[in-house]
Image (cartoon, helix red, strand yellow):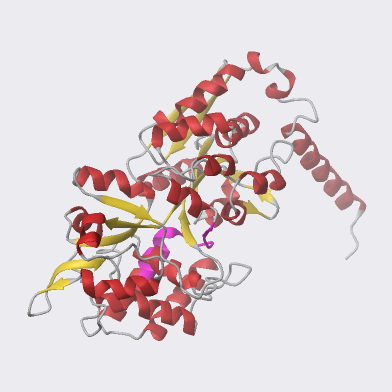
Amino acid sequence: MRLTTSQLIVFACVALVVIYGALLFTCIAPGLQSCNTPAAKITAKLSFWGVSENAKGYEPAFQEFKKTYPGVEITYRGFPSVSQYESALLDALASGNSPDLFMLSHRGTRKWLNKITPIPQALFTPAMLRASFPQVVEHDFISQGQIIALPLSIDTLALYYNRDLLDQSALTVPTTWTELTRAVPRLTLTDASRVLRRSAIALGGTEESVANASDILTLLMMQNGVPMTNPEGTQASFSTSQGADALRFYTQFADTRTESYTWNEGMRSREDFAGEKVAMVLDYASAEASLIKKNAFLNFDIAPVPQVESANKPLSVANYWGYTVSRTSVNPSLAWEFIRMMTTNTQVADASFAITKNPPALRALIAKHLNDPHTGVFARQALIARSWLQPSAESVAETFSRVIGLVISNQSNPSDALSHAAQTITSLLTQ
């Protein structure tokens, strides 16, 4: 199709506007206050939304940014839960009253791509990201060659274990799933009717009884080489024989007919671990404070997540957030400058870690805290963490939990249950 002269003129004008906008944003062309005005004289207000009501962890970043931009005011709004946060954020974005910068889950980036402004490469490049953060960040936060978010912390699944219960059973901490399975009968206590009095590990149940059940199932599948989606991220591909084997392995712990039986749906992983009725749980670093709050005298420690015995490369599952800038922000360059400083300035990020104790994301801080008694496990695992692009964390958790429930209630076999789950996830990915 040949274009008319008027069409060519229109396209040329649009191209010039786009190019100038890019140059303006990166300060190559004049126009923005932040480009024409010395940093010390810039006045602006930035709104910042996050999933935590406690803003203390951001204080080092606020103070450092003020040194360069004393006239920039940053106001933080936190929310009591993720669901309330995302609901309020979607409403704000739809109404055009969104914050300048906000937190973005690494799992559900797809639904936010048309609502954010990527960081300009003049400020931070993909090569710089790869040098600064573990591989999982590149996988999650680079889209079509553009960086869409930067993290401050990376959490991973690890093995919490009751030291007293393992010592009483003369057991060392399992490092593989085979070792863990062998330890189950020695840690499990049942009465004559096979009613559980103590569980070896919180495995086999749905999300209702096992915190992070869907993540644990994902971990088992990924450790066994199961591709969660096709390369384009448009179709679920975990419905394979290896995927079914992973589901079968997971649900055996809730099957009274197996020697690995150690769990039922009437139990609760975190509460029962805190109550010393469960010897081991798989959980994130973020769970530690709540466990201590439930039982200040709980004698527990944390070890790396078990691995498949024959695997060539160890693998854990990540769960973390990044920080991004709204497409409607009137100060996108300033907002990205704050995020870049907060997440990549080693001193600022380390000061934040000192307050929150959240596992660091920066490679430099990971190296520094590898031997930390509380954070070392999570720091090391950030380097081997993997994830997959989900339609949403909530939909995947609900779907996988339903699959687990069908299998442990004998309403479906693992292969059929996974096949239906893959259809559901594919439908959500293509919406």
Task: In the rendered view, tell whether residue 51 sits above or below residue 383.
Answer: above
The answer to whether residue 364 is left or right of residue 394 is right
- What residue is rendered at 59% in x and 67% in y? 233
x and y, in percent, of residue 396 in the image: 42, 65
- What residue is rendered at 21% in x and 56% in y? 164
Image: magenta residue range: 384-400
Residue reaching furthest front? 170
Task: In the rendered view, tell whether residue 142 sits above or below residue 324.
Answer: below
The answer to whether residue 364 is left or right of residue 74 is right
Of residues 377 and 57, the one nearer the viewer is 377
Q: Is residue 392 magenta?
A: yes
Quadrant for residue 139, please give it.
bottom right
Of residues 123 and 219, the one nearer the viewer is 219
Quadrant for residue 204, please give it.
bottom left
Of residues 299 and 220, the one nearer the viewer is 299
- What residue is rendered at 31% in x and 76% in y? 251
Task: In the rendered view, tell whether residue 208 sits above or below residue 333.
Answer: below
Residue reaching furthest left? 192
Quadrant for residue 272, please give it.
bottom left
For the question of whether residue 405 can be seen, the reply is: no
Task: In the rendered view, tell whether residue 233 sits above or below residue 16.
Answer: below
x and y, in percent, of residue 14 in the image: 80, 44
Q: Is residue 399 magenta?
A: yes
- Which quadrant holds the N terminus? bottom right
x and y, in percent, of residue 372 in the image: 43, 42
- What residue is rendered at 57% in x and 47% in y? 115
The answer to whether residue 290 is left or right of residue 92 is left
